Amino acid sequence: MPHCPNCGKPISRQSAEQIVQRVMSLTPDDRVMIMAPIVRGRKGEFKKEMEKLVQHGFSRARVDGELVNLEDDLPLDKRKNHTIEVVVDRLLVKPGIEHRLELSVGLAMKLGGGLVQVAVVNGDETLYSARLACPDCGISVPQLEPRSFSFNSSYGACPECHGLGSRYDLDPGKVIVDWSKPLLDGGLGPGSSSQNLIHGLQLVAQAYRLDLTTPFEKFPDKIQNLLLNGEPQRGGQRGNQRGNKTGFLGILGHLRQNLDASTSETYRDYLLDFMSATECSVCHGKRLRPESLAVKVNGMSIVDFTSLPIARALDAARNIKLTGRELTIAGRIAHEITERLEFLHNVGLGYLSLGRSAATLSGGEGQRIRLATQIGSKLRGVLYVLDEPSIGLHHRDNGRLLAALENLRDLGNTVLVVEHDADTIRNADYVVDLGPGAGIHGGKLVAAGTLPEILASKNSLTAQYLRGELSIPIPKKRLAPSEERGWLEVLGAKENNLRNIDARIPLGTFTCVTGVSGSGKSTLVDDILRRALFRKFYGSKETPGAHRALRGFEAIDKVVVIDQAPIGRTPRSNPATYTGMFNHIRDLFAKLPAAKIRGYAPGRFSFNVKGGRCEKCEGDGVLKIEMNFLPPVYVTCEVCGGKRYNRETLEITYKGKNIADVLAMTVDEAVTFFRVVPQIYDPLLTLAEVGLGYIGLGQAATTLSGGEAQRVKLAAELSRKATGRTFYILDEPTTGLHFHDVAKLLEVLFKLRNTGNTLVVIEHNLDVIKTADWIIDLGPEGGDAGGRIVAQGPPEAVARCAESFTGQYLGQVLEQPVNQYEK
């Protein structure tokens, strides 16, 4: 049901007589053109259409906003969208033209499919419709089409923000880099060296009697707004009396002016660091035109509906009441929408909204959305391959995911899942277990068959964990919070769905943040805590999520995020370079007698600079061959044979091995080889201890899995000199890890904790949660039904909380209560 965007009343059809009345109500002696839209935003040359118009006696038209003669040859680019409006009549508004006007409007309606464009010469234009118009306001809504509700189409998108819902503009919170300092003494970031801006600030300070040595935060809001945005009305006499205008554009206005005038890409990129996306002032983030937002179903606009969590959208879709003609038209559509929402809900995504940005979805969420799409397609005979669909999924929702996979299988499809989750393995019809180890120690088929056949395998590491022979033990002692170590407190957190919560993290402990998907874990830890700490310690320009205060950060000296992002984006990055040991290896080779005789410095043994590297492949070891219309092909360099270095560099050897041989070693081999060189041996031993003994020192970073990259980062942290005051943040570190890898990961995490550091881990894996010192459980549900702290304390306390879904499953794995705390 369309509504008027202005008054909100339902709008109805508009007759030719009503349109004539609207035109006659214009100012007398206004000249108007009556036009019929023939083509609206379509690609093509439209020669036949224009020839037909000429044959019917029309001579003029407006093409893409310009009046043209139809008899002229008008070449249109067939690859671009065009709008063609034929001029039906031109009139002077005065009494007595009603009959002619009605005939012209009727003809325009016939030509334009019910649409009439009335343009006042040098004035406003109005699009009238024989179908949709508000009789009170005179506002006419164009014919509604699917594209009218798409923010990716110019016919549906908000004209101000072009469908983005936000505008990228200078952010006062970033432009003022330090609010505790005066503007011209460290407070102002960009523009602080601009003489024009400084002169403008001095003028406005003189005119309004301001002291520019005052810290910016001490100014009242009114003065801050004056300095940032300038005077509401610019111009007037400049003077030194209060109230006189100076013409000051404001700091932001000055920077915008510079940005528009600048031709330097470097300057523009520099200013981008001080900009943020701000909500569009016209659509208020809704992304659509007012006319589109005014169309409602059951009293809700399309944005109202897509903003609901899927669980509530499902209820709303089920409650759409259609009768008679409405049911005939929209019954099938409503059924399809309800069915798709059910699929999304059944794979555990009831907390997401349909309007959620794809960029904010986790990998597991994106995969489950695609899974719901496939279930809805009801295809048969398809092979589906899923890579760890349980990522980011709470144990409570595992059953829904497994039921969805079984549904795909029961339709007659083959479902192949790469997974480490024990429940998924136990529910599989057939299991293929690879190993027995990782890297060079793996690659063999250890066991294959049904679950009983796998469990009977003696060589399978997976089977040993499933049988319970191997397990991740519950700690005999947990580290209790202490007032001596203190707490890190996030007070009044209310970003996204968080409900003004106060979260307290005991310092010097291993804390898990848990809860069902969508309960607010990432919002609390990443959007608020991580960003706030990065801003305090590193001057980050990212704006933290809404919260009242952050306390206790004085007890930490560094914040480190350890995620599964690659340790490098090019094959040149490798474990040796990332951990820093390669510098010591190059120093070692440069100190060898043969290298000293030849005058080789450490740089000679770098494959990133000229001198010792192979110049044919520039130290890559491979050559990239571009293939037209195909992906590039990499072939081994025929000059160095993939060794990266030239012949002279490779002649320098240590214990019979040259620099290329060293890079080709595995970590385990290198531990033995460099046993007498502490600077190299220590980081190597750390890599081996985190379970990466099988990777190569020179293995390209792009070939490491997410879990391997994460453990390389952990090893690098362990090998650094410990201060005991570092704050580590990890978001689902068990993603992609086998039970055995999780056990090794926990050993590393406890080593970091035991040196006095604080670890905060977002996690669903019960083996990790049960080993934590402290748990903050959010929920109880996701989306609007979440955002509260349901339980907090040691795992045993959380397990006793009946309202906590995490506690219910945690109680099943906590076989023995742990009452003894280590101070």
Image (tube, rainbow, N blue to C red):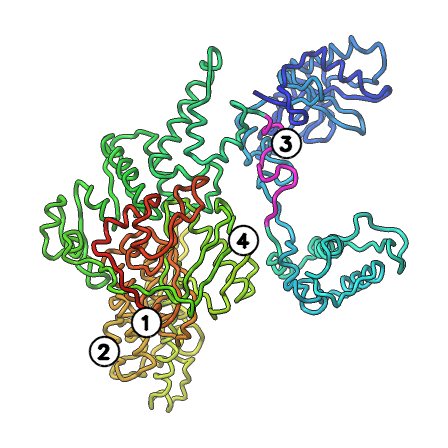
Give the mark nearer the N terminus: 4 vs 2: 4
Residue labelled with disc 2:
672
For residue 220, which quarter of the picture? bottom right
Within-10-Å neighbours for mark 4: few <14, some 14–19, many 20+: many
The residues tagged by marks 3 and 2 sit, at their Cα atoms, a distance apart of: 74 Å
Tag 1's secondary structure?
Answer: loop
Seen at 42% across and 49% down, the residue is 789
| Snapshot quadrant of residue 540 | bottom right
Residue beneath the point at 55% across and 30% down: 149
Q: Which stretch appears magenta?
A: 277-294
Chief secondary structure of the magenta span?
loop
Quadrant where the C terminus lies? bottom left
Between circles 2 and 1, the one closer to the viewer is: 2
For residue 111, which quarter of the picture? Answer: top right
First-in-chain label (3 vs 4): 3
How many C-alpha atoms fall within 10 Å of the one at disc 1: few (<14), some, or many (≥20)?
Answer: many
Residue 125 visible to the viewer: yes
Q: Which residue lies under the disc numbered 1?
A: 643
Labels 1 and 3: the sequence-earlier one = 3
Residue 595 x/y as whole percent = 36, 87
Please name the residue that numbered disc 3 is placed on. Answer: 76
Tell me the crowding category of disc 3: few under 14, some 14 to 19, or many 20 or more residues within 10 angstroms, Cα based. some
